[in-house]
Amino acid sequence: MQAFASSLVSVLFHGIAYGMILYVISVGLSVTMGLMGFVNLAHGVFAMAGGLLLSTAMAKYAVPFPLALLLAFVVVALGSVVLERLLYSKLYSAGELAQVLFTMGLIFISIAIARQLYGTQAAPVFLPDYLKGQINILGRDFPAFRVVLIFISAIIVVTLWFGVERTRWGAMVRAAVDNRDMAQSVGINTNRLFMVTFALGSGLAGLGGALGSDILPVQSTYPLENLVYFMIVVAVGGLGSLSGPFIAALMIGIADTATKYWFPELGAFLIYAATIGLLLWRPQGLFGVRS
Amino acid sequence: MGHSFLRKSLAVAAAVGILTGAASAQTIKIGVVNTFSGPQASFGEMIDRAFRLYIKLNSDKLPPGVKIEIINRDDGGANPDKAKQLAQELIVRDKIDFLSGITFTPNGMAIAPIATQAKMPTVLVNAGTSVVVTRSPYYVRTSFTIFQHCVPLGTWAAKSLKKTFILVSDYAPGHDCEEAYSSSYKPAGGEIVGVIRAPVATADFAPFLQRVKDAKPDALMVFLPAGRTATAMMKSFVDLGLKSSGIKLIGTGDIAPEEELPNMGDEAIGTISMFHYSAAGDRPANKAFVAAWRKEYGEKATPNFAAASSWDGMAMMFDAIIKQNGKLNPDKSIEIMSHFKTDNSPRGTIYIDPETRDIVQNEYLRETRRVNGELQNVEIETAAVAIKDPWQAMQKAKK
């Protein structure tokens, strides 16, 4: 019994760490899809870019870890604005098929570029000594970096909720998600709103990719390999919602970890079966604003 | 007289011209089905670099006028249909004299019937599942088999590590290693306290390793495809405290590949691996090989096991070309290559077992250490001398 309780704690801990990272990366995708109805499959590219930036900044320029995280967020957010203005904005009125094809193309281009610049191996991330080793909490050892990772993600989640639920900008985003035409007609510049939201979402993906490089190793095929997980978070959680993807990400993280721990042979399969079942039951996701 | 002299010299000149013309027209084509794109693209570069370096340094040994041409094709990874189609095109359209490469077992399985039908001497320089070489009488392998690594590893581990937890990737080579390790470890008194077959695409090993930690074994035996998963596994192994709790990490060379060691950092120190090649090996032939490699491709470049197999594979094809004086007959080529033997491989003495057309080589026990600031897999013991593929022997014993 005690052994079971102890393994339960491990599963919850690693599941939450994984879920948090999935959430930080995917939340931007949920909001942009809910807000503009834009199917951005290339969202993982921003996460990969964040991870590669962190690796390069730390390995080549000896940037300290916290600063490199911040750098990943800022550079990816700014870079995404350039992409949004140059490419994405041309396809807002296009059909979903065109958007899917375009963003798939972006994924393949980014994979080729990443392979040229970084090769096929995972980008090395050397954590500072204070993040290595174990932390003892209530008589149990936990890997220090994952404790910090959960902590930082929690701060991001709380800040994000505060921003969306309590600020004027958040009210505008929520209004535009609920009814874009109406929001526009009462004087909200939805184009600019989208640009800012897009940058923020992409920046968070970059931050998540950098922060999570320990759990999801960053290498050239990253955007394609992890696409399914990001999409599941958004589809199960529901488009345009903040809390839905959060619950979904935690569920996926914990369920994935639990199956790996107790039923490793089924690990890759159960998560998809659960997703299919859930979507049959609620096609709009758990908390979806739109289906 | 002047006239006839002139005529004679013209005739001689013409004859010489025809002869040299004929000789220089002889180009021997080697078709290579290799992996240059996708997640395993690093194989393509290693194999191609080894081939080209060998040709560059040894082309003076070829019969006069004979030239080698490499024709590369990209299969993009374990992709049997594509590999089969590429091999077919190389044979029919490009009229190659040898086929080589074959990075992955499924590709080798798919190409085998074509190689047999076309009587195409084929040199496998990477695919490592035991059965693949039996699929065509025109297959010769210079790489390795999983059983060659994992059987001696089990024998060695049983001496001091009484309880092992096994973690393997859930695909054929992983199952091979699990079976091979158990086959020598259990009869020698070792106990296997748990087995996990993890999905090949696993990115985060923490949940698996947590279970290993809770089982408190003496050793964790790991088989993973070489490449990025190894680094993730190594980091989790240390982060979760398995290393500090005294569990010994052992496995095939794939858990500590040379090109990944810089990314792993000091976490990798102390890892025990069983393999047929280490760039740190102190045989003179290996030192010359590594030096030539670095001279050609830069000081930071390091050849890996696929490079060593390809180097030897090219040496074997050269041997067949030289012994037939450039006039190639497929059956003769296979006959010569099946008896290939050299003491000058970077791996030490190697030879081909004429009966199975499979590689016979030494297996080295290595420990990852930091030597002169560089992480290396230092060979501490020759664990098996001239080991034939144990799987083939087991199959025979079953019959």
Image: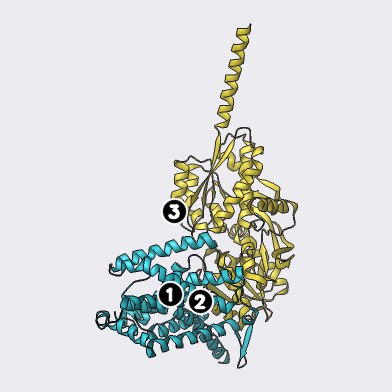
Q: Are marks 1 and 3 on the same chain?
A: no
- Graded by Cα atoms within 10 Å as few (under 14), some (14 to 19) or many (20 or more), the crowding at tag 3 reads some
* Residue A59 in picture, x, y percent from top left: 61, 69
Q: CA distance from mark 1 to mark 3?
A: 37 Å
Residue B349 placement, left or right of B40: right
Image position of B192 with respect to B376: above or below: below
Residue depicted at x 30% and y 69%: A96
* Residue B363 in picture, x, y percent from top left: 69, 60
Q: Which mark is residue B325?
A: none
Q: From this viewpoint, which residue is outermost toward the front?
A: A187
* Residue type, label 3: Lys
Nearer to me, A223 or B170? A223
Tag nearer the camera, 1 or 2: 1
Residue depicted at x 34% and y 67%: A100
Nearer to me, A56 or B292? A56
Q: Which residue is mark 1?
A: A202
* Residue B395 in picture, x, y percent from top left: 58, 59
Q: CA distance from mark 2 to mark 3?
A: 31 Å
Q: Which residue is mark 2?
A: A264
Q: Which residue is mark 3?
A: B82
* Residue B144 in picture, x, y percent from top left: 61, 57
Q: Of helix, strand and loop, which one carries label 2? A: helix
* Residue type, label 2: Pro
Tag nearer the camera, 2 or 3: 3
Nearer to me, B276 or B17? B17
- Graded by Cα atoms within 10 Å as few (under 14), some (14 to 19) or many (20 or more), the crowding at tag 2 reads many
Tell me what hue chain B is rendered in. Answer: yellow
Q: Which chain is cyan?
A: A
